[in-house]
Amino acid sequence: MQPSSWLFDELAHAGDEHLDPAYVAAYDRKAQTDSSEDLALLRTFGLDEASTLVDFGAGTGTFALAAAPVCRRVVAVDVSAPMLERLRERARAESVDNIETVQSGFLTYRHDGEPADFAHSRNALHHLPDFWKGIALHRVAAALRPGGIFFLRDLVYSFDPGDAGAIFEDWLARAPCRPEEGYTTADLATHIRTEYSTYTWLLEPMVERAGFEIRNAEYSSQVFAAYTCIRW
């Protein structure tokens, strides 16, 4: 089925670097993602060998690969073909055979089989403007069973608009200088200018309106947030 002509094009807004095989090859070293905390939290909510988990914006599979040994089924969803190919390479190297890869986005993913028990997303929802975030969150809820858990971690701003300048200048001043050490000042400035991170006080009502109860919210440096949500 072809997507509707009015639908937001997630692939076009994924960021050119995420579609570049050369960038993707070095992505894990730059991102320096540690999935242990997210995985430990989901296990406290019952993630186990009977669980189905959908990872939205799975990227090169760091979280999907960490979760696979303790899940029955992991569905890794991403719009980037090079990212998913890198995930499959990593899965083959680690002899992991219970990860399904789906080239899709929040707005186009269609879940097959029984509703998922868990959903996870890290640093992906900010690629959507707020209108589309609302639709995306509804679609995440639709993929989950009632009582299912959605863990969302992203760049979300917990400050007033008048404080943006001071907070962003401080954030950029603390960024590493070299790309191989992480996201640089230029990277963060590009994120602020061109991507769609929103305020906590806008995102949280969207999450609740989509059919979730926010069981826990954590804020870091006024530019990151993490939410543990339960589907009604």
Image: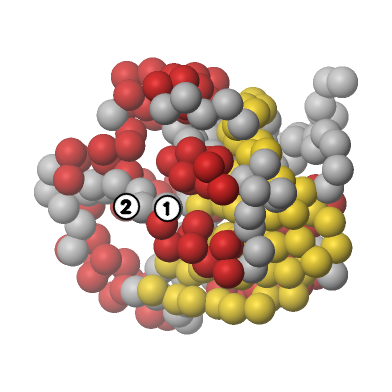
Image location of residue 67, percent across then percent down: 53, 46
Label 1 secondary element:
loop
Residue 227 visible in the shown view: yes
Image location of residue 116, percent across then percent down: 77, 49
Q: Assess disc 2: are there few (<14), some (14-19) or many (≥20) residues with their C-alpha within 10 Å of its C-alpha.
A: some
Q: What residue type is labelled 2?
A: Leu
Residue 187 visible in the shown view: no
**Tag of residue 153:** none
Name the side, left or right, on which 41 lies relative to 119.
Answer: left
Residue at point 66% right, 78% down?
Answer: 215
**Tag of residue 188:** 2
Question: Looking at the picture, does residue 40 appear above or below residue 218?
Answer: above
Q: Which of 153 and 2 is in front in this view?
A: 153
Question: Looking at the picture, does residue 112 appear above or below residue 159?
Answer: above
Work out whether mark 1 precedes mark 2 in sequence or the reverse, and give the earlier one: 1
Would you name the residue on which mark 1 appears?
35
Image location of residue 16, percent across then percent down: 44, 28
Residue at point 70% right, 50% down?
Answer: 51
Name the side, left or right, on which 9 lies relative to 180.
Answer: right
Q: What residue type is labelled 1?
A: Ser
Q: What is the total number of numbered labels drawn onto the structure image?
A: 2
Image location of residue 86, percent across then percent down: 44, 23
